Image (cartoon, helix red, strand yellow):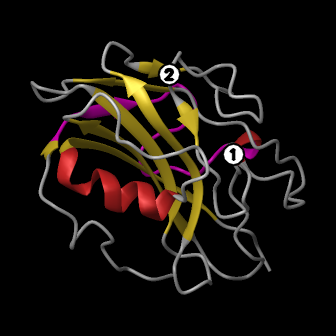
Amino acid sequence: MSVNDHFARLPEAATFTVTSTTVTDGAAWPVEQFSGIFGVPGGKDVSPQLSWSGAPDGTESYAVTVYDPDAPTGSGFWHWAVADIPAAVTELSEGAGDDTGSGLPEGAFQLPNDARAARFIGAAPPAGHGPHRYFVVVHALGVASVGVSADTTPAVLGFTMAGHILGRAVLMVTAETPA
């Protein structure tokens, strides 16, 4: 496992709080949040429930991302990205990231992840690769719309929103597939 800090080169941002009834900061993903699409036994690709509070004044929208910097790709793996969540919304229900996106608030949309599916893809670290970290991040933005299209990659979302981030709330979750 890499110990790189993928936030180190991002703009400084205030912190606020994100919690979940599905996952606990620093703990392992439950089996439902593993990837059935990638063939993990018991995996169901169910996005976690998320609630957040204490976002900075001036927040006009949110984006949510789930990223594994430890994937053996040289660039990590984006599991989920949601843009243009209205500022009045402070929760996503478990399963909101399914392939229909019907659990997302009006105006919000999912971007294609690194599997090119506009949905949540669960954890699927290669067997024997060691523990992976998954950063579940709620980004508070100072714009009502970050201005990306629904076919934008999560990396371009990150680049585009970098100048608009007012705050960042982070849960770090782990997963490992034994050899």
SS of the residue under disc 2: loop
N-term-proximal mark, 2 vs 1: 2
The reply to whether the magenta stretch includes residue 178 is no
- Residue 9 percent across, percent down from the top left: 21, 73
Image point 55% across, 27% down: which residue? 49
Quarter of the picture holding the C terminus: bottom right
Task: Tell me if 55 is positioned left or right of 174 in this view.
Answer: left
Task: Tell me if 94 is positioned left or right of 53 in this view.
Answer: right
Query: How far apart in space, not on screen, are marks 2 and 1 (Cα)?
Result: 15 Å
SS of the residue under disc 1: loop
Image point 24% across, 37% down: which residue? 141
* Residue kind at label 1, given as amino acid type: Ala
Tally the marks: 2
Task: Tell me if 5 is positioned left or right of 54 in this view.
Answer: right
Q: Which residue corresponds to mark 1?
A: 118
Tell me where residue 32 sits by quadrant.
top right
Looking at this view, name the residue that lies furthest to the bottom: 74
Q: Mark 2 or 1, which is nearer the eye? A: 2
Magenta stretch? 15-31
Task: Tell me if 53 is positioned left or right of 147 in this view.
Answer: left
- Residue 65 percent across, percent down from the top left: 47, 48
Q: Residues within 10 Å of mark 1 (few under 14, many from 20)?
A: many
Q: Which mark is residue 107?
A: 2
Q: Is the magenta stretch mostly helix, strand or loop?
A: loop
The reply to whether the magenta stretch includes residue 26 is yes
Tell me where residue 86 sits by quadrant.
top left
Q: Nearer the viewer, residue 111 or 132?
A: 111
- Residue 88 percent across, percent down from the top left: 32, 12
